[in-house]
Image: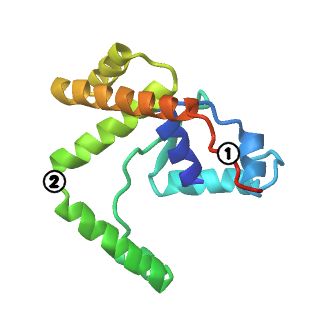
Amino acid sequence: MLRRLAAGLEASPAGFDLPLADTARARGLGDKGGRHSPFMRALARVCQFDLAQMHSDGELEVRRRLPPLNRRQLLRLPTTLQDSHQRWQDEQLHTPRAEQLRVRARRLALSLVELGEDAEGTERQLIRWKFHPVLCREAAAWAWDRHRQALAALEQPDPPDDAA
């Protein structure tokens, strides 16, 4: 459930509509309504662990950054996932905060460009999200460069098949 919410926020950082019935079916939880449906219980668990908060107007606020797993949660994972989690944490500890912010700004900028925002609009939105203005300019330029490269690659003709 949380992965679906995170993917939605990556694609639409300002928020998005989550059609409950479609989302429940896509998760294999069925689309039966009611407070006690499997889907609503999954949403309640997300809120129970303070990963999201439900509002009376039907909005769900979701944390963008999650705390690391505690020891009890980690021990419940398979060994391969425990090892993977440890490698990820070590990598995060050794990655400077400035680099983490740069990567995040670039990802958000690329999402905005892919959603149709121009370079100036992308930069303005990043500034509204409280990134440093210099970082916003760099991230917007990087995203537009990546976008242009992707468009150019699409315009290249496919190589002929050698099925002779």
Residue 155 image point, x, y percent: 56, 29
Amino acid, disc 2:
Pro
Indicate left or right for 44 with 19 as reference: left
Quadrant for residue 156, please give it: top right
Q: Position of residue 54 (x, y in %)?
A: 54, 39
Nearest the camera: 130 or 112? 112
Q: Residue furthest front?
A: 164
Vertical arrangement, residue 116 with respect to residue 16, above or below = above
Mark nearest the camera among 1 and 2 is 1
- Horizontal side of 25 relative to 89 (left or right) equals right
Under mark 1, the amino acid is: Pro
Location of residue 128 by image quarter: top left
Residue visible at 24% across and 48% down in the picture:
100
Looking at the image, do the residues carrying marks 1 and 2 touch, with CB atoms under 8 Å apart? no
Residue 25 visible in rendering = yes
Q: Quadrant of residue 162?
A: bottom right
The residue depicted at 29 percent of the width and 67 percent of the height is: 89
> Which residue is disc 1 drawn over?
160
- Residue under circle 2? 96
